[in-house]
Image (tube, rainbow, N blue to C red):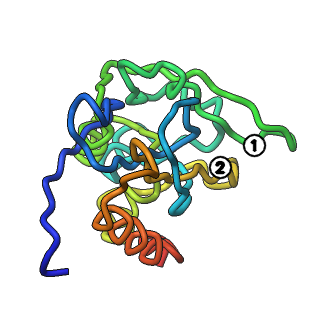
Amino acid sequence: HPGVELDLSFTDRVVDLVQEGFDVAFRIGVLADSSFVARKIGADRRVVVAAPAYLAAHGEPLHPADLSGHNCLGFRDRMHMNRWPFMLDGELREVQVRGNCRADDGDMLYHLAEAGVGVVRLTRLTVAKAIREGRLRQVLTPFTPDDAVPIHAVYPHRRLLPPKVTAFVDFLSAKFDPPPWEM
């Protein structure tokens, strides 16, 4: 819309909407209890990927247990994200992964994986284009759970909500149904 101005900030850190002056934030995953209003605008799945060069040099993990022999890229500040869930024998089980590189930013982990540093688990939203273009390859597909995580628009309050925020969230909600990265 020609009347909309965007002032974007990209971070994996949970921002304080009020203190930092944000109209709306987008959060992927289960939300913590808060006084903010949340509207689900879509869902996404996390997948395990690696660069073809990494897989050529280190072999492809064929079972989640094989990850113990691989350099798994992890999150520095969200250690729970370093326990990757897999469907094993009909049950959802977590595998603790380790590697020589952790970061506090999913985009950094994406770029490290694309550069052949290791294996990473990220959202399809993040890696879909690289998979389509052959820069990353999804691995362990038979073990990947169908555990879509919600994507929410979060804003401080419903009262006095600027119409621009409502219009923006409505627009994105329509664009995420179906998710464009899954096409």
Q: Quadrant of the image for the N terminus?
A: bottom left
Residue, disc 2 = 144
The amino acid at mark 1 is Met
Instruction: Identify the residue at image location x=31%, y=70%.
Output: 133
Q: Is residue 73 above or below residue 145?
A: above
> Circle 1: is it few (<14), some (14-19), or many (20+) Cα within 10 Å?
some
Query: Circles 1 and 2: CB distance less than 8 Å?
Result: yes
Front residue of 104 and 98:
104
Q: Which mark, residue 169? A: none
In the image, farthest residue toward the front: 160
Q: Label 1, on which residue?
A: 87
Please provide percent x and percent y for residue 151: 50, 53
- Above or below: residue 77 compared with residue 52: above
Label 1 – label 2 distance at C-alpha:
6 Å
First of labels 1, 2 by sequence position:
1
Residue 74 pos. (x, y %)? 40, 27
Residue name at image x 25 percent, y 43 percent:
22
- The kind of residue on which mark 2 rests is Thr
Element assignment for label 1: strand
91 w.r.t. 19: above or below: below
Observer-nearest of 114 and 170: 170
Of residue 21 and residue 108, the one placed in the foreground of this image is 21
Residue 77 vs 106, above or below: the answer is above
